[in-house]
Image (spheres, rainbow, N blue to C red):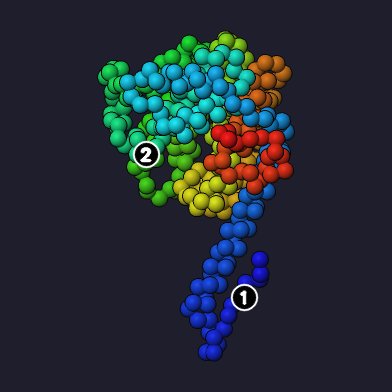
Amino acid sequence: MSTPITLINTSGRPCESQASTVKTDLAAQSQASLTETAKTAISNFIQRLNISVPKFARDLELEQRVSEVMNSWACPSCPQPYVSAAIDITALAYSHVTSPEAKVEIAIFTALAITLDDPAILGSLSSEDFCHDLATGRIHADDGYLGEYVRSLARMWKHFPRMSSGFIFTSGISFIDGCILENTYHEPIVSTQFIEYRRVKTGICDAYGCFIWELAQFPDEKGFMQAFPDAATYTNYAHDIMSFYKEILEGETGNYVQDRALVSGKSSLEALNDVIEDTIAIVERVRRILGEGKARDAWESFVAGYICYHVNSTRYRLADIIETTRGEYRDAKS
């Protein structure tokens, strides 16, 4: 790209159109620099995780079972793009889960969560009464997405240890109010604690951390209980890191990294690097907590599989960053 220059008219001052062109060139160069720096940061993040990213493989059995479950509902199935994303997340991030029915439940729950995260869909439902309907029992008469969501949460005890299931349930319930908060509260952000609080609610991170250790393999939670907080935070932070490049390219605002930058007085790239450092520390800390054994193996599988999902999904536009190894993978729905 050429070096930006200021064109001068006969009066010796930049004319309005020329000044506008210079501003556009500078903005374009700034955007290009930002995206290149983001690419480097994300690429280095993946390398520093010290993981082997698995190849993508569709789980046709999982796809069929999820379709069968949704076809049994009184309401329509979740929108297909949301179902596809849910199946891919489950197949890649939770490939180590041995119970087929546990995988089906993770996928069903995830498809419903993505569906309810759609403001247009959530706004069309009686979502503001959700917690009250749950408390009074009226939710059980709901044959729509909210009712199916609660029924999915109620089945978690079949597939995950007792306390894990409780964490999944409370995280899932809080998610609905988190979505309402995100959709309706648009005041200027000034509190770091609020950003973290909102992110925990909207990320359903406790649930996705608990999904790592299923009941069939890990009936005793004592072996991984202390890893729960960090596992939950990893699911949010890793997603925020892997989403950053797409958000920059598409000009998205109001996301976690940008809001964290705003309240900390840093640039978005500085905030991204802070999140990366926090996430690397989380991964290493969980490794130390778990030591060696099956619980650690499940953690490593999840860390790598979760990254693999983002790499393979065209939504995150990471082919530019992972181009040297992209040939090992394929798009999730090619």
**Towards the viewer: 225 or 164:** 164
Residue at numbered disc 2: 119
Is 296 in front, or is 35?
Answer: 35
Residue 149 rendering spot, x and y as whole percentages:
39, 23
Q: How many marks?
A: 2
| Mark earlier in primary sequence (1, 2) | 1
User: In x, y percent, where is residue 103?
Assistant: 53, 19
Q: Is residue 75 rendered to the left or right of residue 295?
A: left
Q: Residue at x 30, y 32 (%)?
A: 125
The three-letter code of the residue at mark 1 reads Ile
* Label placed on residue 318: none
Q: Amino acid at mark 2?
A: Pro
Residue 41 pos. (x, y %):
66, 47
Q: Nearer the viewer, residue 284 or 2?
A: 2
Mark number displayed over residue 5: 1
Horizontal side of 246 relative to 172 (left or right) equals right
Determine the image quadrant of residue 80: top left
Q: Please, is residue 152 above or below residue 23 in the view?
A: above
Give me the residue at 62% from left, 15% from top.
223
Tell me: residue 42, above or below residue 291: below
The residue located at (41%, 29%) in the rendering is 78
Can residue 179 be seen by looking at this rendering? yes
Viewport quadrant of the C terminus: top right
The residue tagged with tag 2: helix, strand or loop? helix
In the rendered image, the quadrant that contains the N terminus is bottom right
| Measured Cα–Cα span from mark 1 to mark 2 | 45 Å
